[in-house]
Image: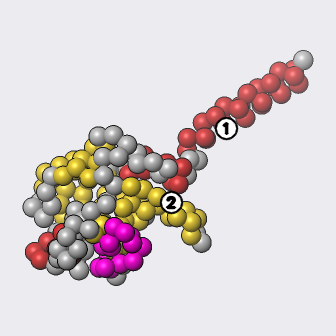
Amino acid sequence: MKIQFMAAIAVSSIFALTACSDDESESLADKCETLSEDCLEGTWTLNHVALKEDPSTPLTNFASAPSVLTFNNDGTFSYQFSTLTSGGCAGMTNSGKWALLNDTQLQMKVTNGDCITNRTLSPTVSVESNDAGDKVILNLQEVYFQQDASNGINAGNDTEIFSRTE
């Protein structure tokens, strides 16, 4: 009887541990199947500015000195401009509040800095397979932070492409 009781406790403990670990083991790729707060929260680096029709080909590459966008879980964000940014915003940090209005719209409200303005964006997230595992890409579907980088050449047809780093 004592052995059966101990076995029952052992089995119960195993079920309790596995039940708790499901949420912790959710991959970033799983979190980013759609645009969500869980997906956005973290640090992103600006890879490049590209044409919307060809987001994988850089028009302006920021790989050597990327800008860094951080979405915090308290609804705030910060954006550290690349030193490659043209104009007076190079190296500056702007910050503000962010919120998902629905599963396709991201609202950005600036509270500190004048290099960006308040706007509602319609970004997409996608997961690409690479050698190290899954790489999550954030496509803003427009140029928001690096407005000077596109120089208006493509008349609003450019987009910023970010990769999730943390």
Looking at the picture, how far across and down is residue 124, in whole percent?
39, 55
The residue drawn where x is 73% and y is 35% is 14
Looking at the picture, how far across and down is residue 129, in whole percent?
56, 66
Which image quadrant for residue 23? Answer: top right
| Residue on which the image places disc 1 | 18
- The overriding secondary structure of the stretch rendered in magenta is strand
Circle 1 or circle 2, nearest the eye: 2
Near-viewer residue (81 or 13): 81
As helix, strand or loop, the secondary structure at mark 1 comes to helix
> Where are the magenta residues, as a range?
49-62
Vertical side of 93 occupied by 85: above or below: below
Q: Is residue 114 magenta?
A: no
The residue drawn where x is 29% and y is 48% is 106
Report whether 112 appears left or right of 54: left
Amino acid on which disc 2 is placed = Val
Pointers 1 and 2 in contact (C-beta within 8 Å): no
Amino acid on which disc 1 is placed = Thr
Q: Residue furthest top?
A: 1
Instruction: Specify the quadrant that holds the C terminus.
Output: bottom left
Vertical side of 105 occupied by 48: above or below: below
Q: CA distance from mark 1 to mark 2?
A: 27 Å
The residue drawn where x is 42% and y is 73% is 56
The residue drawn where x is 38% and y is 60% is 138
| Residue on which the image places disc 2 | 127
Task: Looking at the image, tell me whether mark 1 or mark 2 is earlier in sequence order.
Answer: 1
Q: Is residue 61 magenta?
A: yes
Report whether 56 appears left or right of 66: right
Q: Residues within 10 Å of mark 1 (few under 14, many from 20)?
A: few
